[in-house]
Amino acid sequence: NRMPEFTAPALGNHNNTVTIDLECGADASGVLYALGGAGGGLTCYMDKGYLVFEYNLMIIDRSITKSQHKLAPGKHTIVVETTLKAPKPGAPADIVLTVDGNEFAHTTAKMTVPAAFTASESLDVGADLGSTVSRDYFERRPFKFDGKIGRVEVTLK
């Protein structure tokens, strides 16, 4: 499921909330959603049951967070909340990941992308179909999620 970045929600530089309803097995792996590509982007994925988020700022800086606990098999609601620290281009952003209302991981992107990450990449759900945002799953690309994704809802603030 690909959406060109210029038509996709601006997750890289706006306050936003992404809500994902999913069902996963034990040690689930794969991309939940990814925007952009190897030259810059963001990705939320699972790796052997752990929840991971990476903000790749044009390769200059990578903000990566991984949950300390694995997700139990079953249905979950994952929320990724991005809050810019200032209403200006390039402002740092706090990124908090919750699972079923409990904080699982957080990170701060030191700087956010002033405009779009790329002209050619896309917003992908359930896999990372272009060049991979994260080096961690480059060898496993497109790193398709092995569970079921029900709903992905994006709210810009």
Image (cartoon, grey):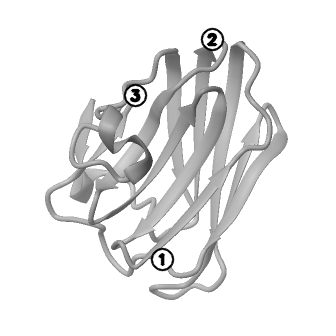
- Where does residue 6 sit, x and y in percent of width and height? 23, 59
Element class at badge 1: loop
Q: Residues within 10 Å of mark 2 (few under 14, many from 20)?
A: some
Badge 1 amino acid: Thr
Q: Residues within 10 Å of mark 1 (few under 14, many from 20)?
A: many
User: Quick one: 88 or 97, which is closer to the camera?
Assistant: 97
Judge whether 29 appears above or below 59 on screen: above
Q: Tell me the residue that label 2 is attached to.
A: 25
Residue 38: name its quadrant.
bottom left
Q: Is residue 93 visible?
A: yes
Using residue 48 as the reference point, say whether residue 72 is left or right of it.
right
Badge 2 amino acid: Gly
- Disc 1 from disc 2: Cα separation: 33 Å
Q: Tell me the residue that label 3 is attached to.
A: 126
Q: Tell me the residue that label 1 is attached to.
A: 112
Mark earlier in primary sequence (2, 3): 2
